[in-house]
Image (tube, rainbow, N blue to C red):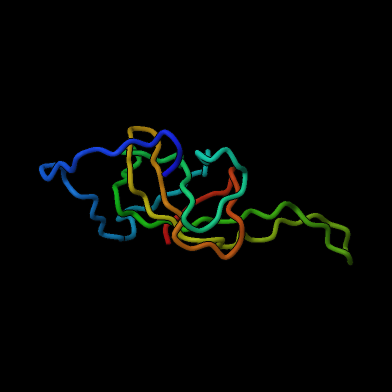
Amino acid sequence: IGPGARVMPYDDSAPLPYFEPRAPENEVAGTILYAPKGVSDVGRFDVVIISGGTREGMEPGHVLRAMYHRKGRKDPVTGETFNPPDESSGLMMVFRVFDKLSYALVMEATRSIRLGDRYINP
């Protein structure tokens, strides 16, 4: 709550935002697009916008795993470039869904989650 915030009367007819955390029924994958705070790294309790919406089967309560993508590395022995596997960087729960994107809350973060990181089923 910040300067300029308003107090509104409680409306008991409005549905309460209860969520049932669960994994998506189908395989999902996408990209973390944006953080409303305007930062490039987010952590626990931050909100992000992801690239999946109702057309991809997203629903409020879906839990997703954020994946950190490491860039290609050079093998010190052979000199060849290889791509290390992606690493888990945290869990997010979808709480608001639109047609082409969704809002998700970062519930757990083992490292910074960055814009452009991928998400998959947990």
Q: Position of residue 15 (x, y in %)?
A: 16, 46
Q: Is residue 84 left or right of residue 14?
A: right
Question: Quarter of the image holding residue 99?
Answer: top left
Q: The N terminus appears in which quarter of the rendering?
A: top left
65 or 111: nearer the viewer: 111
36 or 51: nearer the viewer: 36
88 or 21: nearer the viewer: 21
Q: Position of residue 96 (x, y in %)?
A: 33, 42
Q: Position of residue 87 (x, y in %)?
A: 60, 62
Q: Count the numbered circles shown.
A: 0
Q: Is residue 77 left or right of residue 66?
A: right
Residue displayed at 50% across by 58% down = 44
Residue displayed at 55% across by 56% down = 43
Q: Position of residue 83 (x, y in %)?
A: 71, 56
Q: The C terminus appears in which quarter of the rendering?
A: bottom left
Residue 49, placed above or below residue 61: above
Residue lying farthest to the left in this orientation: 13
Question: Quarter of the image holding residue 24?
Answer: bottom left
Question: Quarter of the image holding residue 53?
Answer: top left
Residue displayed at 40% across by 36% down = 101
Residue 7, placed above or below residue 74: above
Q: Is residue 73 left or right of residue 104?
A: right
